[in-house]
Amino acid sequence: MGYVGSDLWELRQLVGHRLLALPGAQVLVLDDDGNALFQRRADTGLWEIPAGSCEPGSGFAATAVTELAEETGLIADERDLEPFACLSAAKDHVLDYPNGDRVHAFAMCFVSRGWTGSLRAEADEVAEFRWAPLTDPPAPMHGPTVEVLRLFDEYRLSGRFQAG
């Protein structure tokens, strides 16, 4: 859907740019070689993984599937998403957008190793895509994405869900 017309956009019309707590989801997409899909934001030029906020009535997994499809054109099944972390620490996930909006995002982080479809960038949000090894992601990287990659590394080493 994009930002304009979304539930968050409608809320912003009422409350302005003030700091809001916002649930959402992020998806770390891995190919068969273990490379991750990164996307460069159209507004800031920073690299990140597909992510977005929940709409009313939508859960974390459904949001992950929806955001992945909207931003990349890739279709994942909720049942194939593996939750590995929750990103919520204010030091890592208070976001200041170029338009002045502020959010403290609480994101469930999923890894997806299977999908259908082909890459197609959502023009308003994504400038380009790049597949890269987790050990050598593109730069400059969006701060929360750096933390999500760290949490995923901890998850792979421990096998335990990470809370950050």
Image (cartoon, rainbow, N blue to C red):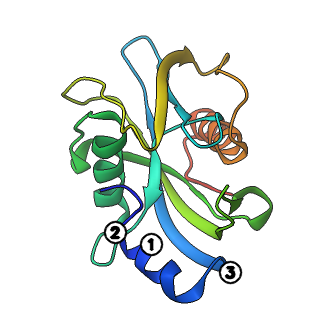
- Inspect the image, locate mark 3, and give the three-letter code of the amino acid beneath it: Arg
> Looking at the image, which residue sits at the far top?
33
| Residue designated by label 2 | 5
> Looking at the image, which residue sits at the far right?
91
Say whether residue 144 is left or right of residue 28. right
Sequence-wise, the earlier of marks 2 and 3 is: 2
The local secondary structure at tag 2 comes to loop
- Inspect the image, locate mark 2, and give the three-letter code of the amino acid beneath it: Gly
Classify the position of the N terminus by image quarter: bottom left
Dot 3, how many residues are within 10 Å of its Cα: few (below 14), some (14-19), or many (20+)?
A: few
Question: Against 20, is 67 above or below?
Answer: above
The local secondary structure at tag 1 comes to helix
| Residue designated by label 3 | 18
Residue at figure coordinates x 55%, y 15% from the top left: 132
How far across and how far down the image is residue 160, in percent? 56, 48
Dots 1, 2 in contact, CB < 8 A: yes
How far across and how far down the image is residue 77, in percent? 21, 44
Dots 2, 3 in contact, CB < 8 A: no
Which quarter of the figure has residue 88?
A: bottom right
Question: Against 111, is 52 above or below?
Answer: below
How far across and how far down the image is residue 129, in percent? 46, 23
| Residue designated by label 1 | 9
- Inspect the image, locate mark 1, and give the three-letter code of the amino acid beneath it: Trp
Question: Against 112, is 23 above or below?
Answer: below
> Looking at the image, which residue sits at the far bottom?
14
Dot 2, how many residues are within 10 Å of its Cα: few (below 14), some (14-19), or many (20+)?
A: few
The local secondary structure at tag 3 comes to loop
Residue at figure coordinates x 42%, y 60% from the top left: 3
How far across and how far down the image is residue 138, in percent? 65, 21
Sequence-wise, the earlier of marks 1 and 3 is: 1
